[in-house]
Image (spheres, rainbow, N blue to C red):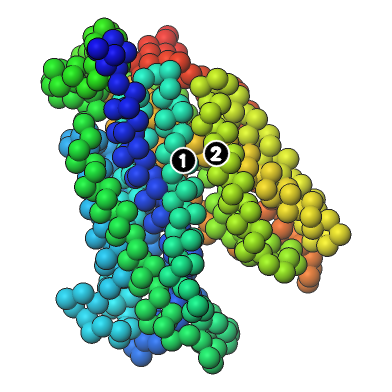
Amino acid sequence: MQQNDKGSRGYLISIVMVAVLGGLLFGYDTAVISGAEKGLQAFFMGAQDFTYTDGWHGFTSASALIGCIIGSALSGLLATQLGRKKSLIIAGLLFFVSALGSMRPEFLFFNYGEPSFSLLIMFNIYRVIGGIGVGLASAICPMYIGEVAPSNIRGMLVSWNQFAIIFGQLVVYFVNFMILGEHTNPVIESIGQGVNAIAPGSDPWTIATGWRYMFGSEAVPAGLFALLICFVPETPRYLVSIGQDQKALGILSRINGQQKAQQILSEIKNTMTVKTERLLSYGFMCIFIGIMLSVFQQAVGINAVLYYAPRIFGDMGMTNPMVITVVMGIINILFTLVAIFTVEKLGRKPLLICGSLGMAIGALGVAVTFGNESLATVTAISIMVYSASFMFSWGPICWVLIAEIFPNTIRGAAVAIAVAFQWIFNFIVSSTFVPMFNMHLTEGDHFGHWFTYGLYGIICVVAAVFVWKLVPETKGKTLEDMTNLWKNRRK
């Protein structure tokens, strides 16, 4: 039979597609706030027991990131103790609870439709719960795919997880648009010192109900993910680590064919003489490189562009910044596909280095031209070059490398640490962008714009040098090969 000789490619693709639903939920959960935040802000501005300021709204909009840091930090412990599959089931359930709780935070304890400080705390708790699910999925989905995929197509399959993240963000933009329908978001007017007022004529449906449907819509993909993940197998490498060799062999045989499965099983067992080892068993550089891959993925500034694109294009004087933002989103999808279909041919390092240099050119292009209305088109193109370069390089390839470079015996803990740093620097970059962007040396100058993108451009160049000098190429290597690579580097 073909399955016995070569394995079943259909079986592999089916379980990977279930796993990448976690990536889609990752993108969905982090982007859902973009459509809901104005209605949510107006709702809590109606509270009688406290004043809902810009500070509170900024915290509420970003509170899921707190959960992301917690979830990614816990992912290693859960993946090691419970397994990859059970950890993803937990992530799916957390997504589901968060979606329903964010839609109706009054459940059990509060009167429906009555904003208060206590209700705000409850809403943020539900958002943090969803963030924990994002943190778990962001670390364990690439790990799961990396551990089931054959080495010759592993990079491509892990890259699909990044595509799912970007696709999930686009899906929720369209879902929010459909939910809004003929209704409009409220107009929020500043009255000074971080306090706002709702402009007369704002749509009451959006304030009372619209944002609830947007958060609740996530329950559909979350429930589907939690259900489908129950039907995929545990990863062979985890099964070997807990002594279930025959189960591991059965799964490897279905994916790779019986003869190849025996060879892979032997390689796994040779690197699993102990179930776990100390984190630094393979040297400081092994962990350092994994962490710095995560740090650079965020420090190059991409989330400042993705989160604030409409603000940036609006500051450039463009009349319809949302249209340009959508165009950029489509370009992002196309260039993520470039990575998926070239990562196994070109390798990880060439894509990262080329992407870093492309981002540097784009960022420095923005720094030089921003504020010059006659060069606004050049500025917009530079931003798109910057974003597209990220999408075929640091976006997907960072996840591929984090899933690949760590030896089997420390992978759970090492991936958790690397991904936690990713979320920490996501928060740092996202929270510092607006203050840096709005800096002025003299009234009306564009110093902040130049400084911000100049800084990102310099970091992109440093990232290219880091990859060139320190990051190992993992194309075509098995996960077991990485154990020998790091052992040899220590000699």
Q: Quadrant of the C terminus?
A: top left
Residue density around tag 2, few if under 14, some if 14–19, many if 20 or more, within 10 Å: many
Residue type pointed to by label 2:
Thr
Secondary structure beneath dot 2 equals: helix
In the depicted view, which residue is nearer to us: 14 or 112?
14
Residue 470 found in image quarter: top right
Secondary structure beneath dot 1 equals: helix
Residue density around tag 1, few if under 14, some if 14–19, many if 20 or more, within 10 Å: many
**Residue 273, how many percent across, how many down?**
20, 14
Looking at the image, residue 122 lies above or below residue 360: below
Circle 2 is placed at which residue position?
336
Q: Residue at x 21, y 47 (%)?
A: 227
Residue 97 found in image quarter: bottom left
Q: Residue at x 19, y 41 (%)?
A: 230
Instruction: Identify the disc placed on residue 162.
Output: 1
Q: Residue at x 25, y 54 (%)?
A: 223
The count of marks equals 2
**Residue 411, how many percent across, how many down?**
32, 28
| Dots 1, 2 in contact, CB < 8 A | yes
Residue type pointed to by label 1:
Gln
The span from disc 1 to disc 2 (Cα, nearest Å) is 7 Å
Q: Quadrant of the N terminus?
A: top left
